[in-house]
Amino acid sequence: MMRFVNIMVIAALIVAATTVYKIKFDSTLQVEKAAKLHNELRRERNAIAALRAQWARLDTPSRIKALADRYLTLVPIKPTQIDNFDDLPPRPPAQPQDPIGAMLAPNAPLTTGSLPAKRR
Amino acid sequence: MTGPAPRHETRWQRLVRRLLYGHDVDRDVKAKARIVLAVVGFALVYSAIAGKLIVFAVEGNEHGARHSVMQDAVATARPDIIDRNGKLLAIDVKAPSLYAEPRKLIDPDEAEELLTAALPDLNDRELRSRLDSKRGFVWLKREITPREKREIHHLGIPGIGFLTENKRVYPNGPTVSQVIGLTNIDNQGIAGMEKWVDGQGLAALHMAGLATDRLQRPVQLSLDLRVQYALREELVKARAKFKAKAAAGLVLNVNTGEVVALVSEPDYDPNDPMRANDPSRINRITTGVYELGSTFKILTVAMALDDGKATLQSKFDATHPLHYGRFAIHDYEPKNRWLTVPEIFKYSSNIGAARMALAVGVKGHQDFLRKMGELTRLRTELPESAAPIVPHPWTDLSTVTIAFGHGLSVAPLQAAMGIAACVNGGLLIKPTFLKRSRAQALQVAKRVLKPSTSRDMRYLMRLNAVQGTGTFANVPGYYVGGKTGTAEKVVNGRYAKHKLLTDFMAILPSDKPKYLIFIMLDEPQPVPGTHGYATAGWNVGPTAGKVIAHIAPLLDVEPRFDLPGPAQLILANAKPGE
């Protein structure tokens, strides 16, 4: 009986030791991986910051203005060029997509300048 | 628990047992209890050891983690600064810096030779003295380029190393310099909003060595980069055209107190801090104090109207210059008759304004200006501010001159705050450089004027832009209102006739003002096209017109052309429903 218990305890000891070692080893591995990822993140963030700074520099109004003056014929917008939707004239009546084609269609009602189309 | 005693015991044995343990104690039981005690004890000890092992395993290798923080902690990180639309105004980028540990140097001569070859702009003697010093650590060069770093790294000099530091970058150069300020080589804010950021607990974080990562929340300013740029561009042009010493401009949201744009030209490039300390490059909107001239009549008229000492129909005597002691107050364009309040405003009558102020009295005048925040130093987020120069003692004559804007020097931002209160419905809102909502602004707002006074002031401002001195700024479609001001500068204690400071306060749109635009030119000169004049109507007026035409579309102010005349402003608003 005691011998059996002893064997069990020794076996448990070995298993426990192995497990602990494995856990320890894994955790070290994970820590290293995490540190590596942290470093990578930091590097990426730094790169993003550098790129954002560069972007902002390229996007700065004074530079855009200089480029626009050089390559575009745009001029500043005048107040008279701005209006809102309420002031739009009503939508013109819908036109057929292809007025001449519609006239030529075989079963279309005959429409000429002197013979207006009949409403069906 | 006493079991039966073992049977095969001799009499002697029984006697000994009884003598040792008493007659009813079982030795086996006692021994078992002891074993249990030992087992429990050992179990506790081992579980403590196991627990500690687990703790070690979980917490892991602390040494490595600390190392990576150390590398970063040299120059402290700062939060990004963005404008109200999220455009970047300031950001940290990493730059390597070169250092030496002189005690670890094996051959300083060789090191010096190699380094000067790699970095030709290093000062020979300074480098030599630093390498020869017996200190543990010396900086050799801050912020070197990645290429220089690579070259020096390949030289492989022992005792020479690199640390990564944060370097502040301002992508927009001088455009926002006056508000944003700048940082020193150790990335600490030394002016403008940068210094304010440090005051918000960042400095304490730096001391603790914690402000090292980029995850700090960006600081969002109330500035609009586009408006800021447009304003600066127009002011640079105006300053060149009128050969002025300086030009300054401000766009203030009258309903929230947000500063949308602030320009004070000449300015500096915060990426090149060498020129920032030049005293001619101060922020004239917050740090300069000026006698603003006739724009102060806005406050005088608002005071008289709010006090009930005048209505829009009241008339004041402007038939003769106003004599006061040995002084005589003249009008720039004398009408020599009684003037109504709108006429006083329109013709910018000094006599009329002085009489209105006298009607309120010295005490009332002082109290009103104090209430409007014109007599105390205005402190905003910007660390730079200046106290107004208030006459002491404040006599009747002081009231007379201050009524038309002489004798009291205030910071333009302060005056803009007071005038915004005159047109926004009567609420005094402290200006801010941080983005905020109308609701947040209302929490700090203070009612200083009746809404009816504010309505009358809008009418007067609009009237002046249509018929008075502000016609050059009346951009069609935006319903601009405004008031000019021209002040003679004080030189050696006297007013100098030909050293003028001209300024303009515009509101847009006048029927429901959203923005106040302030433009100021320091010593503009008469130029061809101004008929020999250097007064405000001829220089800041047209400049304000150009600024408004340029920035109104950016500010989402809708142009309208079917608007009634100024008189309709009070009639329409006087409806009982309003």
Image (tube, coloured by chain):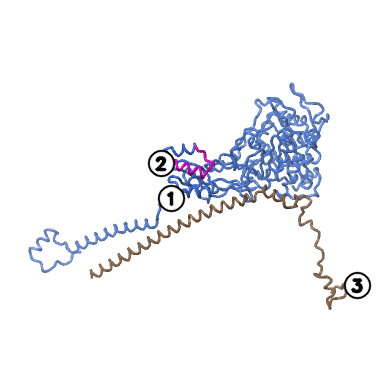
Chain colours: A brown, B blue
Indicate left or right for B16 with B115 as reference: left
Residues B356 and B282: in front is: B282
Q: Quadrant of residue B239?
A: top right
Element under disc 2: helix
Q: Amino acid at mark 1?
A: His
Reply above or below: B174 against A36.
above
Q: Residue at x 32, y 63 (%)?
A: A17
Q: Are marks 3 and 1 in contact (CB under 8 Å)?
A: no
Q: Is residue B458 visible?
A: yes
Give how far apart the Cα atoms at labels 2 and 1 are: 22 Å
Give how far apart the Cα atoms at labels 2 and 3 are: 107 Å
Indicate left or right for B30 with B93 as reference: left
Evaluate whether label 2 is on the same chain as label 3.
no
Which subunit holds the residue at mark 3? Answer: A
Residues B130 and A59: in front is: B130
Residues B344 and B556: in front is: B556
Residue B143 pos. (x, y %):
53, 45
Q: Which residue is mark 1?
A: B67
Reply above or below: B172 against B47.
above
Which subunit holds the residue at mark 2? Answer: B
Q: Amino acid at mark 2?
A: Arg
Label 3 vs label 1, nearer the camera: 1
Label 2 vs label 1, nearer the camera: 2
Name the main secondary structure of what is drawn in magenta.
Answer: helix
Q: Quadrant of residue B524?
A: top right
Residue B451 pos. (x, y %):
71, 42
Q: Which residue is mark 2?
A: B103
Find out whether residue B245 is within the magenta segment. no
Label 2 vs label 3, nearer the camera: 2
User: Which segment is the magenta one?
Assistant: B105-124
Q: Which residue is mark 3?
A: A115
